[in-house]
Image (spheres, helix red, strand yellow):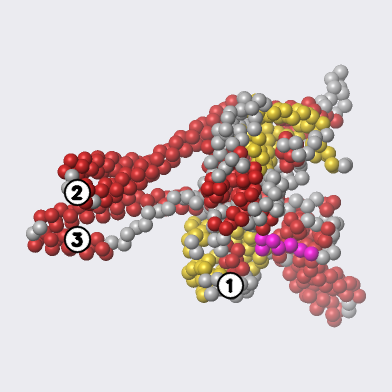
Amino acid sequence: MILSVSNIDKSFHEVPILQNVSFHIEDYDKAAIVGINGAGKTTLLRIIMGELSADDGIVTVTRDKTIGYLSQHEAVSGENTIYDELLAVKQDIIDLEQRIRSVELQMKTASEDTLQRLMDTYSNLTHVFESANGYAYKSELVGVLKGLGFTEEEFSRRVSTLSGGQKTRVALGKLLLLKPDLIILDEPTNHLDLSSITWLETYLLNYKGAVIIVSHDRYFLDRIANKVIELDNTKATVFTGNYSDYALKKEQLRTARYHAYVKQQQEIRHQEDVIEKLKSFNREKSIRRAESREKMLEKIEVIEKPSEVRADMHLKLEPKYASGNDVLHVENLSKSFGSLTLFEQLGFDIKKGEHVAVIGDNGTGKTTILKMINGLTPPDTGEIRLGSNVAIGYYDQEHHVLHMDKTLFEEISDDYPTLTNTEIRNTLAAFLFTGDDVFKQIKALSGGERGRVSLAKLMLSEANFLILDEPTNHLDIMSKEILEDALNAYTGTVLYVSHDRYFINKTATRILDLNRKVLTGYLGNYDYYLEKKDEQLALIDNAVKNVHAPAHSGQNGLTGKTASGEAASSSSPAADSKQDWLARKEQQAAQRKKENELKKCEDRIQQLENRNEEIDTLMASPDVCTDVAKLQELSKERESNDTELSDLYEKWELLSE
């Protein structure tokens, strides 16, 4: 065991954040800590690292074990180059190498008396050097830098000239090269592109030590985690397996709790009916039996009805009117900034109802394409044409569509002047802004809060073509799931840029990959893209080679436009693969139908239970209890409700299985 966390309590201003939190980390564990924003994940990490004291409880690190920690906003500073900054981590190996060279020089001129001693020293030093991977430390350093997205041309850049995200990547590289027994990472994927995230996944999977990760990247957690520690309502629960295993078990637990609740409520009502019947006999023996049953009923530990998952935040996207079948046509699109060419002669079409994800490394021009479609950035060449009746709703990752000096209330009321004060407050409340929150200025909000305001405006827009730039940035896992559900239910068209692979897998019906200045299409979700991307990249490489090849036998080499076009058009999957994908989509649709039926069943059970309570109240009221006809009518209705409830319980059990 490396780490033991035992009975940790922490409160801020008398508000409990963590209560009785306990878990342990074994030598090769890859553990994920999950929970909504504000659940106390970063607080827990800071307590583990000793940066924050716990109110109660103990954190124990096994003797001689080392811990490396990368906080969410940690970065490096100074005038070192990127390469030298990481090289400093290997200073002990560099010093050891210099000692070896020194001994080698001494051995050349040593007398016979001292030579044996020097040879022994040399043997010991080289053994330590080899054990510390001394012969490969430079290639290891270069591998980490390239894996984190730095090119060799950038190695000589000064740290002081880097962006905040680049400095965080350098700090991550230093931590990985230190190779502590336990690595603790707080949101490590925030400043990485897809290829760098994939590299980090592989690195951590093969890491010989233990890892604790706090991340909202569910695909990342799926690949790495073998243990999930959930923080919910100040408590910690440990689940074995990756994120998908955790999500499944979590839903099973909720289902089991609801099942137990329903069964207990049935039993309670049955016992109450028996007690009432015994009392109605009005005999001493029956009254004693009724009282005995009442005492037993009082001792029952009543199960609370499980709350609805994600019940607080509500997001429903619905177009005001339908667009034509042709939503967007892009042709010969090119864009350069100075000597940097992002892409040339791109072309694609989007049809009504498609959910299209644009993916690619940082800096390839994905956001630029969205800005061009929205008219915010002019293209160098090309045509962008919207179809008939297309109304755009735009979600900007930098939230330029928001006005920083306005309050939340003004942001909504100024853009939607027909809404009443109550409607505006209800809209903001659906996105967790209540009370005086609505009078906060936009500039005072966090990134996640600004994201929720942008989503609120998007919901009100009633657009039929949503263009979203990194919509899941700053959202916690619960909010991402709400957005996924809303987009999957949305009947309009969606085009979005995202590096959230789990989100893409859940919502995309087609993927456009911007790679090597070429846009390649894949008909399917992210898993399908992973299956086919190597094959398509090989086609692009061949097309590029043909572009530069000399003409032979009277045939011209391909133009850049044709190479790009052929790579894109050739990306349609073979017929059998397409059938497999369609079969998967049908299976997913059937599953969603079952889930909807289960929800309707639960709602109907709740409706009937509430009505039975109303009937019981009415039957006890002075106006009704003397009205025989009304009592018979209500009694008959309750009997009918009970019969229907009995059938619904059976249906719920079948659906929940």
Q: Which residues are magenta?
A: 71-77
Which residue is label 2 attached to?
625
The residue at the point 59 percent across, 70 percent down is 47
CB of mark 1 within 8 Å of CB of mark 3?
A: no
The overriding secondary structure of the stretch rendered in magenta is loop
Q: Residues within 10 Å of mark 1 (few under 14, many from 20)?
A: some
Depicted 260 relative to depicted 532: above or below: below
State the separation of the CA atoms marked 3 and 2.
Answer: 26 Å
Q: Position of residue 479 (x, y in %)?
A: 56, 50
**Residue 146 in view, yes or no:** yes
Q: Nearer the viewer, mark 2 or mark 1?
A: 2
Which element carries disc 1, helix, strand or loop? strand
The residue at the point 28 percent across, 61 percent down is 300
What amino acid type should be assigned to the residue bearing mark 3?
Arg
Q: Which mark is residue 293?
A: 3
Locate the C terminus and report the quarter of the image it occupies. top left
Q: Give the mark, 2 or 1, whose residue is nearer the N terminus.
A: 1
Q: Nearer the viewer, residue 238 or 286?
A: 286
Side (left or right) of 478 relative to 554: left
Q: Residues within 10 Å of mark 3 (few under 14, many from 20)?
A: some
